Amino acid sequence: MIKTVDLGKTVQTSEGQLTILKGINLEIKKSESVAIVGASGSGKTTLLSLLAGLDTPTRGQIFLGDHELNDLDEEQRARVRGEMVGFVFQTFQLLSSLTAMENVMLPAELRNDPDAEEKARELMHRVGLGHRIRHYPRQLSGGEQQRVAIARAFASSAAVLFADEPTGNLDTKTGGHIIDLIFDLNAEFGTTLVLVTHDAHLADRCGRSILIESGELVVEGG
Amino acid sequence: MHFTLAAKFLWRDWRAGELTLLLWALIIAVGTVTTITLFVDRLQQALLNESSTFLAADRVIASSDPIDPDILARAEALGLKQAQTLSFLSMAFSEDRAQLASVKAVSDSYPLRGTLIVADAAFVRGTPITRGPGRGEVWMESRLLPSLGVETGDLVDIGVASFPIVKVLVKEPDRGGGFNSAGPRVLMNLADVAATEVVQPGSRISYRYLFAGDPDTLGEFEDWVKPKLGLEGRIFGVKEGTAGIGSALERAERFMLLGGLLGVILAGVAIALAAQRYALRHYDHVAILKTLGATPDSIDSIFVVMFVLLGTLATMLGSGIGYFAQTAAVQILAPLIPIELPAPGMQPVWLGMVTGFICLLSFALPPLLKLRKTDPVRVIRREIGDASIADRSTYLFAIVGTIGLMWWYSQDLWLTTLVFTGGVVAILALSIVAYFLLRSGRIVGMQAGSAWRLALAGMQRRGRENTMQILIFGLSIMLLLILYLVRTALIEEWQAQIPVDAPNHFAINISPEDTGPIRALFAENNIASQPLYPMIRGRITQVNDELARERDKRREQTTGDSGPGASSGRNLTWSATLPDDNRVIAGKWWSSEHTGEAQVSLEEDLARSNRLKVGDRLIFSIQGRELIAQVGSIRTVAWDNMRPNFYIIFSPGALDDFPSTYMTSFYLEKDQKLFLNELLSRYPTMTVLEVDALIEQIQTIISQVTLAIELILGLIMIAGSLVLLASIQASMDERFKQHAILRTLGAGRKLVLGSLAIEFCALGFFAGVLAAIGSEITVYALETEIFQLDYHVNPVVWIMGPVVGTVLIGALGTIATRKVVNTSPTTVLRGL
Ligand SMILES: Nc1ncnc2c1ncn2[C@@H]1O[C@H](COP(=O)(O)OP(=O)(O)OP(=O)(O)O)[C@@H](O)[C@H]1O
Ligand SMILES: [Mg+2]
């Protein structure tokens, strides 16, 4: 499903060139769940954004499904994201001007899917927020907002779900519920899951862990 | 197309207040343009109509012979309204007295424009009437009644026919100057002229054919007629007909256009600011949409649809508001505007709408189209992609849009270029000055109390934004100052043109032996008069060995120049001293004891059109004899000062061999009118031209134009304030954060409010200084290049700029950002 060959990322900073990722080779199979772990600043988020096609590498190749991301321009990458990828972020990233329900409808609407509303309603019920569909993000708690974000991620019928520390902003108990929800839905939809986390317990729940240290892949455990 | 999505975003952003400022800026842009164009349109029409009453028509063909009937047939075919007048001098007789009168016979459709004012007895107030005398009756001017010893109802004889005096004529619309209006007026019906047998072959008669209709048809007619008129006839409209009014109207139009132009630019700036702010606040949204699979194209389509919807709404609201604002303005001002405004047309409304969309395209769309480039990585790393907000294409759009709009409004490339380059130079120069002002502000702040330090340190920290803001404030104030200065200069110029005590009567044909007694009579009656000038008819026959007529013909063929011809008959005079208001621009005025060879001084236009230079040898034909004179000087003449003015002035002694009559001009108050009867009965050979009615009309028009200009100024002021508000709003987010953080750190409300007030006052002060510099320079260029006014330094600007800046921006800014202080810091921080 996902494969990288000698993936590298170097950025230009005021103090000169900074190499964040130094030649990463990895492969993630369909319906697998993988945790990316590592110290803060090791390059986990950077790797995730490359795999998801949010960012472009400075070296190497990325294959996502049938696409080689390097070959695609921004327009095409956006389309791939729309068709294949779902995101859950640490900071939720809901559109504040839309209601919870409308946020969930967005991916389908962007694809001009006529059933957007119906699907969104179903998912809202599925994440346990059937009664809050008309509320705006600011009227929801952090945990609720994250559940909306999860609903939205699955609304795009994505093949791969990328989650960057989805519980980082939540207390332990709420975080637990969120993680359960992600794994349940993941099983239900048969999605491939790529999860960045600090939490060893959480990493254990995934099929396998990838440890990153200073931009290098150290251990691929399972 | 993501129409529903766009509509949803539009609705939500609107509810969240994200679009309020942008919408208002657009509405004001469209509204200002609609209001101004509508108002200008109506006022222009009205003023033109009003001025047309000077001619009693829109176009007049004046001729000393009857014109070709084909011309009248053509006018008929084009659907123009027509009337005819015929004027001549004739004696009017009562039973025992006689008086030379200036008779005007008018056709039944006279007047086509304007009204006559008539009364039933002499020397009383009259009432307006829109027709001339009927068949078999005459109307005459008040002072003719005592001098003939008659009253209304009595009979007078004109030629061999007699007519009852039915009305007393108080005012006729087209009573201009000219010889045929010499002497008191008798008005009669054209159909009665034949019966008088006064008009014989060879009598001196002036024919006027009056036309009225819509401007296009008139233009077509004029183009067709021009080549058909011989040397004796000419066609003219109000602009050419009365020079003083023409130039006043033209300048007023230019002023209004300039006003409209500045209004649009100001609104454009407000729109650009609001759109920038909107875009800045939406980068995160777009980044999220992109992670969800929105392609750059779909981002474009969402925001374009949104803004087209917004634009449509704004232009509709704006033009509606403009329409009503203008109607209301007219209602409120109705008592002040003594003329009736024609109904507003639809064209200005379209103009406003188109303007709205052009503004949207050139000012709002560029920052929005940047949104497509938002890097989706922003959802993870927020700082990415902020800097790309304003790149070259944004400026290009705005520049093309601004120039396009300016050109479209002013229809004047020179004015556009001038204002635009002026603006660009000002912006460059002013940003440098602004930067240094900010630096100096910090140095002052170092030594001051805590609110001051906070304020000035804050200003320094956001140096770039504040330089921008000072610039925008400065430019807005500058534009307002410019408009104010030009307005003041225009109005002063107009008022100076015809001072209240400008001579309103001309006396001609004064015989030399009467000059002394007449001077004494004026003194005795306390009447302000000009010197008496000798006046002789004559014309130039030869210029340096070349026939003057040949030169004229050649000039007309080669250059098409319609300036004064060299060979035309003119009034000549001589003078030892240079008349007041004249200025020598080439050569030298002769010394007051000049003797010897005859010299002449020529008026500038005459000299220029005919390429006459100092030193040229001219041969004049005067009373059938030749006189040789050399051009000694060229001078400018203030034609509209209502004093005796001459194209050609001879040196003393040159005209001694020719018997001449004298002329002068003098000022009579309304209640001194009867002095004319005394003057004329004592010196029956002299002729008096009464221009008091004409002057009064000019003054009315000028006061109307002045009022219109004040109104436009007011409208632009509103647009300017909006820009200030938009600019303050645009900086709100930043200030919110700053001050919320300060307050969580324990800064009191008072300190925060104080520092805000100081910051805005300082910004305003700096902006005001910039505005003063900028406006002084621009006004210099405008007054000398566009309005042909004399420039002088405006000390008032140097006070007004900084004071207005400090007070206005200080107040607006503090009020607008008061919310910063009144919102609890947590609300703000949660929104970060
Ligand atoms: N665009 C960029 N410019 C400069 N430095 C960058 C950029 N992107 C990432 N970095 C740096 O690269 C390193 C890796 O960043 P990244 O966000 O991938 O780490 P992370 O493993 O996700 O850390 P954390 O666990 O704290 O989220 C960091 O030191 C970061 O500062
Ligand atoms: Mg990270």
Image (tube, coloured by chain):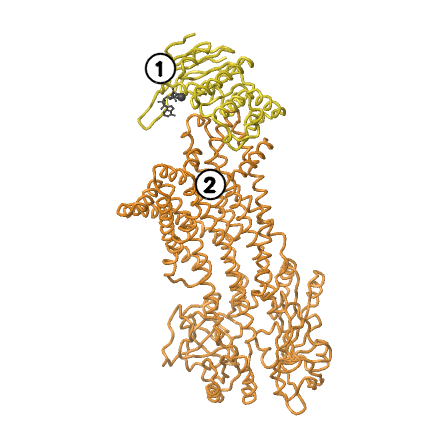
Q: Is residue B749 left or right of residue A102?
A: left
Question: Residue B19: x percent and y percent?
Answer: 52, 40
Please give the chain letter of the residue carrying mark 2: B
Residue under disc 2 on the same chain as residue under disc 1? no
> Would you call the spot at circle 1 few (<14 residues within 10 Å), some (14-19), or many (20 or more)?
some
CA distance separating discs 2 and 1: 47 Å
Task: Say the numbered circle drawn on residue B308.
Answer: none
Q: Is residue B236 visible in the rendered structure shown here?
A: no
- Residue closest to the eye, B443 or B163: B443
Please, is residue B477 above or below residue B167 in the view?
above
Q: Amino acid at mark 2?
A: Leu
Q: Give the quarter of the figure containing the N terminus of chain B.
A: top right
Please, is residue B207 above or below residue B683 in the view?
above
Please give the chain letter of the residue carrying mark 1: A
Task: Name the residue carrying label 1.
Answer: A213
Task: Name the residue carrying label 2.
Answer: B396
Please, is residue B446 above or below residue B603 in the view?
above
Say which element carries label 1: strand
Say which element carries label 2: helix
Question: Residue B191: x percent and y percent?
Answer: 72, 76
Specify the chain shown as orange.
Answer: B
